Amino acid sequence: MDNMDIHRKSLSRLLFGQVPADFADWVDFVAITSLLAFHWQVELEVYALLSLALGLPYLVVGPMLAKYIDKGSVGNALIFSSLGR
């Protein structure tokens, strides 16, 4: 096994470890929207604000941190992003 195969295997393990975190984000989104829709019966503007609140960190923080992530390790970026989330 050469160094590249080891790197791919560890990267795929890290990416596979990201799946539970992404699934948990999806469950949170469904739970929040269900609470807003069925319990609080909010107006449509609240859903727009929720979408904005969920997407804005990706639009603001993502481009600022991209140059640091490109220079560093992908594994460290996945670990720190999961911790930050």
Image (spheres, rainbow, N blue to C red):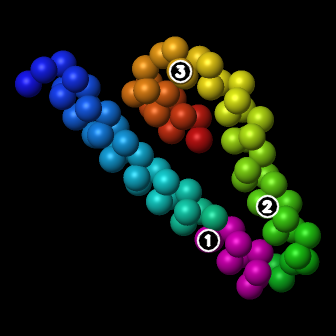
At which x and y percent is residue 20?
41, 54
Image-quadrant location for residue 41: bottom right
Q: Amino acid at mark 1?
A: Val
Q: How many neighbours does mark 3 have within 10 angstroms: few (below 14), some (14-19), or many (20 or more)?
A: few
Q: Is residue 2 left or right of residue 77?
A: left
Q: Quadrant of residue 66?
A: top right
Q: Residue at x 73, y 50 (%)?
A: 55
Which contiguous range is marked in magenta?
Answer: 30-39
- Measured as percent of width and height from the top left, residue 62 is found at 67, 33
Report, in whole angstroms, how far the alpha carbon at label 1 lies from the one at label 3.
32 Å
Residue indicated by mark 2: 50
Q: Position of residue 68 (x, y in %)?
A: 59, 17
- Disc 3: which residue: 70
Image quadrant in which the C terminus is located: top right
Q: Residue 30: which numbered mark, if any?
A: 1
| Circle nearer the viewer, 2 or 3 | 3
Q: CA distance from mark 2 to mark 3?
A: 30 Å
Image point (26%, 32%), residue name: 8
Q: Is residue 49 magenta?
A: no
User: Which type of secondary structure does the marked residue at label 1 adopt?
Assistant: helix
Of the image marks 2 and 1, the number of the one nearer the N terminus: 1
